[in-house]
């Protein structure tokens, strides 16, 4: 697609073209410095580079073409929103979280300054007219995974009507029934939006498609346990981020091709870092595009990131939906059961997350864990204390980091990470 075609499409979506061009220019250089400058990248990384280069171009064009054919676009901010339902209604599902400081001053007209960067970012991108995904959506789905989001959606609803799913805060039997009712409520809302009845056959296919995507990502996680590490943490994070934007069938095929290449690299004993490079697991808050600051800092110290315990990581891919049910009721139960396994910090108690962090660290042979919390994210900041205590009992060192999207603390972070990595030697 030519630049003029891009601009015509963005203009039709009512983006602020000057601000949008400036954003893409900055991100292009940022991406080049962090990703393209890496040595020993896989051939399959060309797919990742192409998707990111056209994330506001060809992918948006595909969304517009889908809409022209009568399909709806549904956007979400959280892994609790079932993509299976979207696909069962022949709609397109996209992620809407943003990972950059943009429109922050505008966002602070709707939410307090001491709101986490992720929330201010998606509000700011909308208010500054920078996000073609939000502008392409026929339905935006929020969820009550933290108090910040709950209150932010009230304000956000004034500028972008938002359907909100009620996520329970415990994993009791009544909580599970509440969540099942929320899935059914969402299913009916999607049916009303799309004009398509979600039949058992359609939902079964939606479940299969999303499970196949998760299997490809599970395969990637397993391969990262190899030594030397066959892929950088930056590229692996990029894979997980792209999973929220690209067509699921295309994405699954491309990531399985990438995994084939990884298997060949492992068989040859090749890697992206020396065999004795410190291996780190990232744990905690999600990192939305283009939040690549911490992985870049970590891997600039000579360490390599071998796993992510986050919503853009194993929290989203660890569990599959049971595909054995043939009735709609049975599939709704399967969806409810699978999504209730998500170990989000919104739950109390949340002891299974401690087990999952510990198990993943062992699985990928991590030498240490960096627990990442966005500034003002109370749930994950609280849980950092519990995770640290559990990992200490396991004999695994942990560094707790709180930061936001700004680049002002990069040198401070680098100093702290370098000191932590030295202790692992």
Image: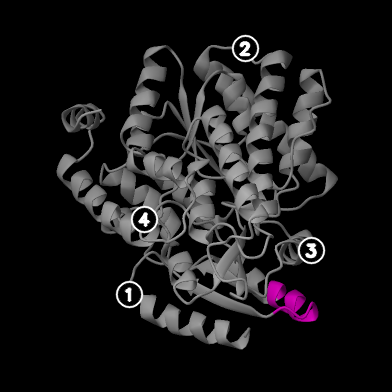
Dot 1 alpha-carbon crowd within 10 angstroms: few under 14, some 14 to 19, many 20 or more? few
Callout 4 secondary element: helix
* Disc assigned to residue 197: 2
* In this rendering, the label closer to the viewer, 4 or 2: 4
Callout 1 secondary element: loop
Give the labeled residue for mark 3. 355
Dot 4 alpha-carbon crowd within 10 angstroms: few under 14, some 14 to 19, many 20 or more? some
* Residue 212 at x, y percent in the picture: 67, 33
* Among numbered discs 2 and 3, the one appearing first in the sequence: 2
Give the labeled residue for mark 1. 408
Position of residue 178 in the picture relative to residue 281 (left or right): right
Give yes or no for contact between labels 4 and 2 (Cβ–Cβ under 8 Å). Answer: no
* Among numbered discs 4 and 2, the one appearing first in the sequence: 4
Give the labeled residue for mark 4. 36
* In this rendering, the label closer to the viewer, 2 or 3: 3
Compared with 378, 198 (above or below) is above
Give yes or no for contact between labels 3 and 1 (Cβ–Cβ under 8 Å). Answer: no
Give yes or no for contact between labels 1 and 4 (Cβ–Cβ under 8 Å). Answer: no
Give yes or no for contact between labels 2 and 3 (Cβ–Cβ under 8 Å). Answer: no
Inspect this view and state whether residue 191 appears.
yes
* Among numbered discs 4 and 3, the one appearing first in the sequence: 4
For image coordinates 46% across by 37% down, the residue present is 245
User: Which sits in the foreground, 336 or 283?
Assistant: 283
């Amino acid at each position: 697609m030519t630049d003029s075609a891009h601009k015509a499409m963005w203009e039709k979506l009512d983006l602020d073209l000057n601000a949008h061009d400036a954003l893409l220019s900055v991100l292009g250089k940022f991406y080049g410095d962090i990703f393209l400058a890496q040595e020993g990248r896989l051939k399959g990384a060309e797919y990742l580079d192409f998707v990111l280069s056209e994330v506001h171009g060809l992918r948006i064009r595909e969304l517009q073409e889908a809409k022209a054919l009568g399909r709806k676009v549904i956007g979400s901010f959280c892994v609790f929103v079932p993509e299976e339902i979207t696909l069962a209604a022949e709609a397109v599902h996209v992620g809407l979280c943003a990972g950059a400081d943009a429109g922050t001053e505008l966002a602070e007209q709707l939410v307090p300054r001491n709101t986490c960067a992720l929330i201010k970012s998606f509000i700011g991108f909308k208010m500054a007219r920078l996000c073609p995904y939000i502008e392409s959506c026929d339905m935006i789905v929020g969820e009550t995974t933290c108090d910040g989001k709950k209150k932010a959606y009230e304000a956000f609803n004034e500028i972008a009507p938002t359907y909100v799913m009620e996520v329970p805060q415990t994993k009791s039997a009544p909580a599970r029934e509440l969540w099942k009712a929320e899935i059914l409520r969402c299913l009916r809302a999607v049916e009303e939006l799309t004009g398509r009845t979600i039949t058992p056959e359609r939902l079964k296919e939606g479940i299969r498609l999303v499970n196949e995507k998760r299997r490809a990502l599970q395969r990637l996680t397993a391969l990262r346990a190899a030594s030397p590490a066959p892929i950088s943490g930056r590229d692996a994070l990029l894979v997980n981020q792209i999973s929220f934007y690209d067509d699921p069938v295309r994405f699954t095929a491309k990531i399985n091709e990438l995994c084939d290449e990884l298997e060949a690299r492992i068989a040859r004993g090749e890697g992206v870092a020396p065999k004795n490079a410190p291996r780190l697991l990232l744990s905690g808050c999600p990192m939305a595009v283009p939040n690549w600051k911490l992985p870049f800092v970590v891997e600039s110290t000579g360490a390599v990131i071998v796993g992510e315990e986050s919503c853009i990581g194993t929290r989203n891919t660890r569990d599959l939906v049971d595909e054995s049910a043939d009735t709609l009721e049975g599939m709704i139960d399967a969806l409810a059961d699978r999504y209730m396994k998500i170990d989000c910090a919104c739950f109390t108690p949340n002891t299974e997350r401690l087990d999952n962090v510990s198990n993943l660290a062992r699985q990928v042979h991590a030498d240490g864990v960096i627990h990442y919390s966005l500034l003002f994210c109370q749930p994950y900041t609280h849980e950092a204390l519990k995770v640290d205590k559990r990992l200490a009992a396991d004999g695994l060192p942990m560094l707790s980091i709180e930061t936001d999207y700004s680049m002002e603390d990069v040198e401070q972070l680098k100093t702290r990470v370098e000191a932590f990595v030295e202790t692992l030697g």
